[in-house]
Image (cartoon, grey):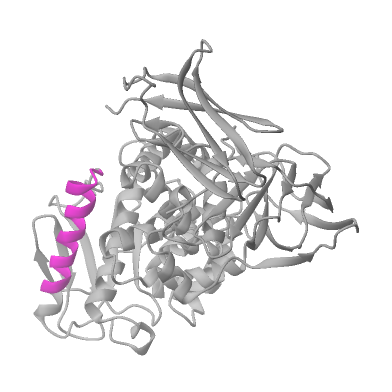
Amino acid sequence: MNLIISFLLFGLLEASSYEKYISTKQSYSLLLNATERIHATPHITNLVRNGSDNIDIYNPSKLKQLGLKIEDLHIVSAEPNNLDEFYDTEHFRIYFTTQGDSAVEDMNYVYNMAQVYETVYSFFIDSLGYNPPVVDPNVNHNLYEIYIERLPSYYFGITYTKNTNVANSACASFIKMRNNYTGSQFSDHTELENIQVTAVHEFFHAIQFSYNCYERIWFMEATAVWSEDELYNDINDLYRYIPSWFSNTNKAIDDESSHMYGSFIYFQYIDEHLGGPGTIKSCWEQSQEMASPIHDKSIDAINAALVNHGSSFEDAYLRMRIANRIMNSNAGIYSYDEADGYLSVGSYPLSEDIFFQEGISKTEGYQGLDLYESKYYSIYSSSPINIEMSPYDEKLSMISIVKYINQEVWSVRSGNTINIDTDIDIDWISIIISALDYNGNNWDYILNLNDGYSEDFTLYHPYPNPSFGKPITIDMQIINSQTISTTIYNILGKTVWNTTKQYTEPGFTRLIWDGQNNNGARVANGLYIVKAEGLKKNMIYKIIYLKEE
């Protein structure tokens, strides 16, 4: 695996007033007029939270079809009362019937669902360490309730919040599951597989409601979809969201249309590179601490969880956008384990082509890039090219990715001005423009393309950085024949490690520093300076090395 990287780490975020809520009218319409498979929970939740604002537009009989009712000028959940049997497991009470429209085929269906839910419970509570969902204090048992009944044709399952007072920001809830998953609309998977992905998705919603009943819908759905593959990795139902998500990079990551399901890829990136499933759990713990019925704290919560891993919401966002373009399982910090699977159902993010000719300046403008949206460009040039974004705005990010031909090697840079040297064979060049910051929207920008220059050599950002006891990789692109000396200094300016090498032809070189000085002794924790000195220029990067605990 070869990877050349240079990424920008962003600081803490500030409070957000930026919201992209789906309207209650949209949710109501989607629930009643579904023509394809739908996750109903976010729309049911939207009606329960916000439906009282337009209470007169809702038909009580249609609300009843959705398992809802109007009570004291509010929309609330209505628990089923037509199920005459129940089956108890260690953690669940499952209501069902063998008569009428909601009848199950036989008891094996109930037993199988019960077994799946106990597996899901063990995954979230025993393995990942989440708190169990709160149980309604008004029931006469301590089990979480699941109802098996006939649901509208395209519904997988629904998690309803209860109109019950419990502690702080938590809501009690219950889940409805279908009495069969054999319809043609579910034929992509077996009935058991449909039960499995639905159970893990809906039970995570139950946990989420217990942590923060006010949380943004996009955050709930993106992490619930992520959890499906975490437990049932071989089903891959979430692959169906990838083509649309990659085709709509102009939609923000927190957009609450169907785009939010594909936003699971953000949390997949965090899972693989920024602390594993425990970081997702930390996001929800932070959400619980910051819970507010008025203010959107979703991004603040994610940011707070990522700070402990030397990252931030925006840093992870930009890394994800890069990884989505590279889409390779061997790309280091920009990799996905299932990159080949993602590509099998879709393609790379949709991009706009820009052709550059040596000696002819060119401009490309764009209007209306919104917060947490990204715009991808594919650049075609046979000569070195310099790309400048104007006007300068620290809340607009420009990143270049260069893929070198016949090698799994990528060069990633960021900045307001980027030079791309094409003297070494290049497979493709991409530019990503992303809108950041909490307090703005609708950015306009211009890309100015001019002749670039040959770079002699380039030192790329060492990685991992920070390193927790892992060897640090130092990559360089060599353009011209020369001798390059690479030295690592401590903060006092004392040399701790160095190497010198003669390069006779263009190419790539990789150095590995294992955290030892020239005498073979382990260095102390702290900040170090990497300096590469060539024939015509010097390059410097800061690195942090920490011994593994």
Left or right, 505 with respect to 81, comes to right
Q: Residue 286 colored magenta?
A: no
Q: Quadrant of residue 144?
A: bottom left
- Determine whether 4 is above or below 28 in the image: above
Q: Residue 116 colored magenta?
A: yes
x, y percent for residue 351: 67, 66
Left or right, 206 with respect to 449, comes to left
Picture quarter with the N terminus: bottom left
- Determine whether 306 is above or below 59 in the image: above
x, y percent for residue 290: 45, 34
Instruction: Please provide the residue range marked out in magenta.
Output: 111-130
Task: Determine the residue positioned at 53% across, 67% down.
Answer: 258
Residue at the far bottom in the pictured view? 184
Dominant secondary structure, magenta: helix
Picture quarter with the C terminus: top left
Q: Judge whether residue 391 can be spotted in this image.
A: yes
x, y percent for residue 278: 31, 42
Observer-nearest residue: 517 or 320?
517
